[in-house]
Amino acid sequence: MELTVKDKSANLDIKIEPFRSSIRTTKPHKHYKYFEVIFLSEGKGYHTIDNDTYEIKPPVLFFMRKEQMHHWEITTPPKGYVIIMKKSFLEHSIDKQLENFISEISNHVCVEVEDEKNLTQIFELLVEESKNPSKYQQSIIEGLLKALFAKTLINTKPIQSKLSNLPPLYAAFKELLENNDNIKNSVNYYAEILHTTPQNLNAICRNAIGLSASKLIAEYIIKEAKRFLLYTNLPVSEIAYELGFKDNSHFIKYFKRNTEQTPAYFRSQKD
């Protein structure tokens, strides 16, 4: 099956607009070279991102990174806002703290919103400012984005994906991977925490999703590596260290084995 790739940015560095109420059910697709923020204040249904399905319980925020596959199954009229941000927007930024906020918030996929009123006001201001080009527009939008991300991070309550009908051991393993800032490239490590054997953990994962535990770990490590490569300016050697690789060459081989690209080549394609 050929994967659909959509580019909704219309050659703009950033696009901010209301969420289209006509969106209901979409086919699985991925977006082209941008970071996306989706705020829903109304609507029910499900949002599937990669292999995870989230129930839509407004008010809620979704954060989607480049190359993530997703689709909607919305059953009632949705209402909210969408921000589509290319890497080029950050390259023109005069405030590098915004990049740090995005790097931090991209660790999350689905977040419960506590301060709906103020977040709605920020989104309304962002839509208004995006329509008023001026020499101050970039600075104003950057300031509003910083306020949006900072308020979100203050009261972050990540929502876990629905794991119904999946083995409890697999669900526990996946939760460890999703909530661990330092993912270990070791099935033995997680098997010990879960009080099982590496062989059993691999078997459980294969039965649940058709992938071994080691392959699932690799997916999370590669996702984190891509996040570093896309949203930070860290050298590849430093990213390797952050991800627990003992040397740069091992990380490059690992990344290439799992993506068929070198880290440097992957980073070069972000523009």
Image (spheres, helix red, strand yellow):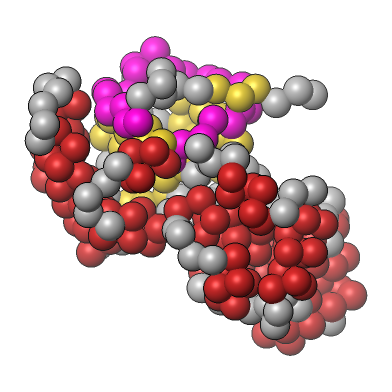
Percent position of residue 174, x then y: 64, 64
Quadrant housing residue 239: bottom right
Query: Looking at the rendering, in which quadrant would you find the N terminus?
Result: top right
Residue 251 visible in the snapshot = yes
Quick check: 236 left or right of 125? right
Is 143 magenta? The answer is no
Q: Residue at x 30, y 42 (%)?
A: 92
Quick check: 106 left or right of 118? right
Q: Nearer the viewer, residue 164 or 230?
A: 230
Please state the total of marks drawn on the protein image.
0
Quick check: 241 left or right of 189? left
Vertical arrangement, residue 66 with respect to residue 220, above or below: above
Q: Residue furthest top?
A: 22
Q: Nearer the viewer, residue 183 or 58?
A: 183
Quadrant housing residue 144: top left
Percent position of residue 250, x then y: 77, 72
Vertical arrangement, residue 102 with respect to residue 195, above or below: above
Q: Residue at x 79, y 48 (%)?
A: 260
Percent position of residue 14, x then y: 32, 31
Quadrant housing residue 106: bottom left
Residue 75 visible in the snapshot = no
Over which residues does the magenta segment extend?
A: 13-35
Is 17 magenta? The answer is yes
Percent position of residue 120, x then y: 16, 37
Q: Residue at x 46, y 59 (%)?
A: 233
Vertical arrangement, residue 270 with respect to residue 169, above or below: above
Q: Nearer the viewer, residue 215 or 34?
A: 34
